[in-house]
Amino acid sequence: MNSLSNALPIMVSNYSKLFGITVRIQGTSAYTNGQVITIPRLDMSDPTKARLAYGYLAHEASHVRYTDFSLIKTEKIGENLLLMSLLNILEDCRIEKLIAKEFIGVYENLLLLNDYYESEWKNYCRNIHNYDSISILLSFIQCYAQSNIQHFVSSRPKASFLFYVLKTRVQYEDLKKIIRIIKKSFCANSTQQVLDICKEIYSLVVSLNFKFKEYHSDPQFIKNLGDLNMSLQSVDKMIKSKVAKRNLSLMKEYAKFRNLCQGDFNNATPNKGGAHIIEENSLGTHSSSREDFGLFSDQDCPLGDPDFIKCADPSYGIRMGLRHKVLGYVRHYGKHTYSSNRIDPIKAQKVCLGEVNIFKDRIVARDFSTSVHILVDVSSSMITTDGENNSRAFEACKTALMLSLALENIDGIKTLVTYFPGVRNEFEIALRDNEKVSKVAPRFDQTPRGSTPLAQAFWYALGKVNSLECQRNIVIVITDGMPDSISNTMQCIEYAKKHGVEVYGISIRSEMIKQFFDNAIILESASKLEEKSYELFSKLFDVQKCSYLDLIED
């Protein structure tokens, strides 16, 4: 594991970008709804748990990318436990093969996820005589498909053992028919094709005569027999195949199968699935909702006043002053001039006019750039006016706009602005490093709402540091109070210090910010934001005071 192993939000954020998904870190459960993947908090300092998390994210991301969820709803497949179990097994094989081909390194994490329940498999095989034939058949289908589609080496011996057991419970000719149908899934190209294959397997399974032992006729067993009759009748219509007479062996095997998996298709085989694994390894039960992280996806702020850029007109003077200061900084660190021993003929002609320096200058360019990421608090408390004409939020938005305009189009300066909370996510983007402020100014007009998820926005900013690859990185936080999670905010601060990221806080009438930031400014009124921000930036880009002089000269 690298130095980012403890930074779960950054790693998950990167995975969400890689797979084109949205990830939420909260609670104690792991699940996806086809749009958002939710996982509980994990201890990412453990390499195995980190890889399990990445494997689970890759698996669920592959469902989002490749699975047609509409089929499950349209054809009401979820109402039939056996058919849904079949579809879950074969569709998992198909989508994992696709995502492992598309993204390097995913295969190994998926294999680790698959092998997680190895002890459960050994126990299952050791006590195979106690399990129903349907469960064994599904386990065989899973292992046989995995060994041929994903090429999981560990699945092949399991498939061989389960096939041997099935021969004692199902007619050999019927088993060969099932295998022939399974092989069709090896080249399936869509969820619909997999579903058609599963329906074909289902039609064959419900016509089988199982060899079974007598089971106790308890009330739950009788209830399951009734459920089976209803279930099979409804699915017969769906798959357009009628079984003339239900045999008692099938009904008894199905009843035991249903009891075993408790009505959940994820429990149909010893491989309970990634969600169970992540939940078993989570820290969710030891944290409150304020320790959770929420959504990780890059979404833009909703557009506000289309003429919001006009709010920056009164600040033209200080903007130009700051701009010239930053330009001087960039010229100083971005290039350096040396005098050579070669005569410049143009300068030599001016000797009679008093020109003293007649030698050519040589300009050496340096690869030195600076990122400035401004995090703006627009939580509910920012609606306060403090007796002034404008709210704290309005002044903060206006200040962010002023600073961004001052830094616009300066080579070597990358400016980003993020608001927290967002309307849809815990943070939303007002300005990306490759955008012009003048084009996206309406995003800067945001109204107060919600809580103060500073840590989420902070982790996003720290994640951007890695992709921007600047020599100097600055994060400015404009806020007016306590963040939702003190512990997570402190982790951000420590991570920033460790990786050389400069952090500065500007607080409106709140001394609490000093608990987090070594460099903080406390304002008596939001109306002072522009003035104090200008003073802070002037110091940050003062060539005489900047500590980067020694760094460059060395």
Image (cartoon, rainbow, N blue to C red):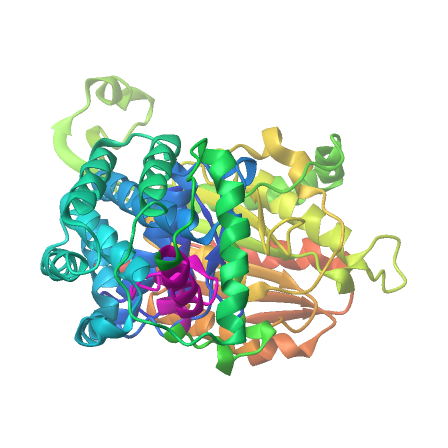
**Residue shown at 54% from the left, 69% from the top:** 27
- Residue 439 is one of the magenta-drawn residues: no
Left or right position of 497 against 322: left
Question: Can residue 105 be seen here?
Answer: no
Quarter placement of the C terminus: bottom left
Residue 394: x percent and y percent?
A: 76, 50
Residue 1: x percent and y percent?
A: 22, 66
**Residue shown at 37% from the left, 73% from the top:** 215
Of residue 537 and residue 483, the one placed in the foreground of this image is 483
Dominant secondary-structure state across the stretch colored magenta: helix
**Residue shown at 71% from the left, 39% from the top:** 312
- Residue 260 is one of the magenta-drawn residues: yes
Image vertical order of residue 48 relative to residue 336, above or below:
below
Image vertical order of residue 183 relative to residue 536, above or below:
above
Residue segment shown in magenta: 250-279
Of residue 207 and residue 193, the one placed in the foreground of this image is 207
